[in-house]
Image: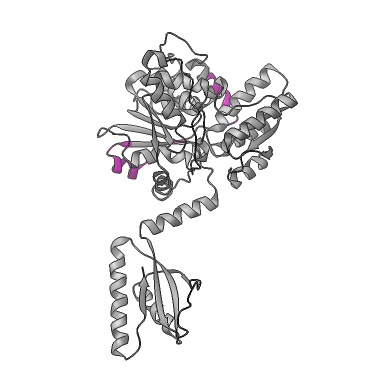
Amino acid sequence: MDADTPQNPRDADPLPLSAEAVVAAHAALKEHLFETPLLPSPDLSEACGASILLKAENIQRAGSFKVRGSVNKLRKLAERERVEEVTAASAGNHAQGVAYAASRLNIRSTIFMPEEAPLAKRRASERLGAQVRIAGRNYDESRAAALDYARDRGVPFIDGFDDWDIIEGQATIGHEIFHDLGDRAPDVVLVPAGGGGLLAGVLFYLRAVYGERTRVIGVQSDRAPGLAESLRLARERGASGEHLPPLEVATRPTIADGIRIGRPGVRPFQVIRRWVDDVICVDEESIYEAIVYLYERSRLVVEGAGAVGVAALLERHVPLVPDSTAVVVISGGNIDVGAMQKITTSHLYKSRRRAVLRIRVRDLPGQLARIVSIFDRLRINVAEIMQPPILGRPPSPEYTVFDICVETEGETHIPDILHALEEERTRMEEEGVEPFQILER
């Protein structure tokens, strides 16, 4: 199919979207944004037995796909009327998208963010020129505050997902996927989903150019399953569910804060309900693992919301036929440095690439050095040595307890370390020296 002449998906009830308008939007956005690459992932491809391509929106302007919809919305708004200020609500990425778009078009922006919004995203929005106000415990409460502000000040509220211009802007990702692959339709496309704007946009355009040849699947955190639950109910109802609005669901804190939405958008859901193949959920642990996997194997820094598609693949939630092709939209890379450190450190301990040995030694000069020398002979790095706090009964003054953190090659390496420590204990006994004791590992 010619990329310049896409056909709209066939449906008896047309929507205010067109594939031609998406192509036009993409052309208009070029001066403000850039096309992100479709990166092959050899390690993930080998693990899945299929060709996996990563649409790297984490390296887009302002660090996420959100700038596409924001610039598209504000440029259209500015074409219709004089706009001096806009307001929005966001946990981070939409805030940066609106701030970036507003600065490009010389418009002031006031952004309402929840208390849980990562500090890095707050600061980034401010650097892009936004006035940031903290309001509410979650996105929905921040949204209510932003809507009050918009009404009181008479300024436009820029919705993060429930807006046709926003959806059209996000659909340009689908256009780029088609531009890169041409008529070689991918078998599966995985798209992160919260409010539904990104999923609706990509889904609409890919249905226009590939029809049913490509399965499009939304991926959510199981701590914010609004779209998955809404779709399940609508499809259970059959014909009577065709006009059901999306559900309001309770959410819980998640590392995928960018898609923690209690109620998906009405407009995106109109698209998703009609054409999406499925919306699935992944758990918190799998998102952590996907973040680390992308960093280690693909050298990509990805936030929680951006990693859910890879999490779904690693957990085998999406069956892939051998030699098929899957595209995963990596929607953003704005992860807080502190959160990244916690995730990677936790991964090192869970994978046994770091181990902590609690050792009691006689309180004599040279005892700790003798233990450290064992790790030196094994060429094992000692990452940290700590003395645990004394709680309850203190140990005998004749002994000192240390927690020694060492870097290992994994679970199979630990028995070698313990064997070397036991050998050293035996030598100390033969020398008539009281050996150290391994209390915990």
Image location (x, y in percent) of residue 305: 48, 39
Q: Is residue 37 magenta?
A: yes
Report the residue at 66% width, 35% height from top: 111
Above or below, 21 against 326 in this view is above
> In this orientation, does residue 40 appear?
no
Q: Is residue 222 magenta?
A: no
Above or below, 301 against 277 in this view is below
What colour scheme governs how the chains and residues are painted in the rendered image of this protein?
A: one colour
Q: Tell me: 57 left or right of 423.
A: right
Extreme residue in the left direction: 322
**Quarter-wise, where is residue 88 in the image?**
top right
Residue interval drawn in magenta = 24-51
Image location (x, y in percent) of residue 72: 59, 24
Report the residue at 52% width, 21% height from top: 266
Report the residue at 49% width, 31% height from top: 249
Say how many tags the image has. 0
Image location (x, y in percent) of residue 64: 53, 37
> In this orientation, does residue 331 appear?
yes
**Quarter-wise, where is residue 50 in the image?**
top left
Extreme residue in the bottom direction: 432
Q: Quadrant of the image for the C terminus?
A: bottom left
Residue 359 or residue 277, whichever sits in front: 359
Above or below, 392 against 86 in this view is below
Extreme residue in the top direction: 12
Image location (x, y in percent) of residue 1: 38, 17
Residue 121 or residue 376, whichever sits in front: 121
Above or below, 417 against 86 in this view is below
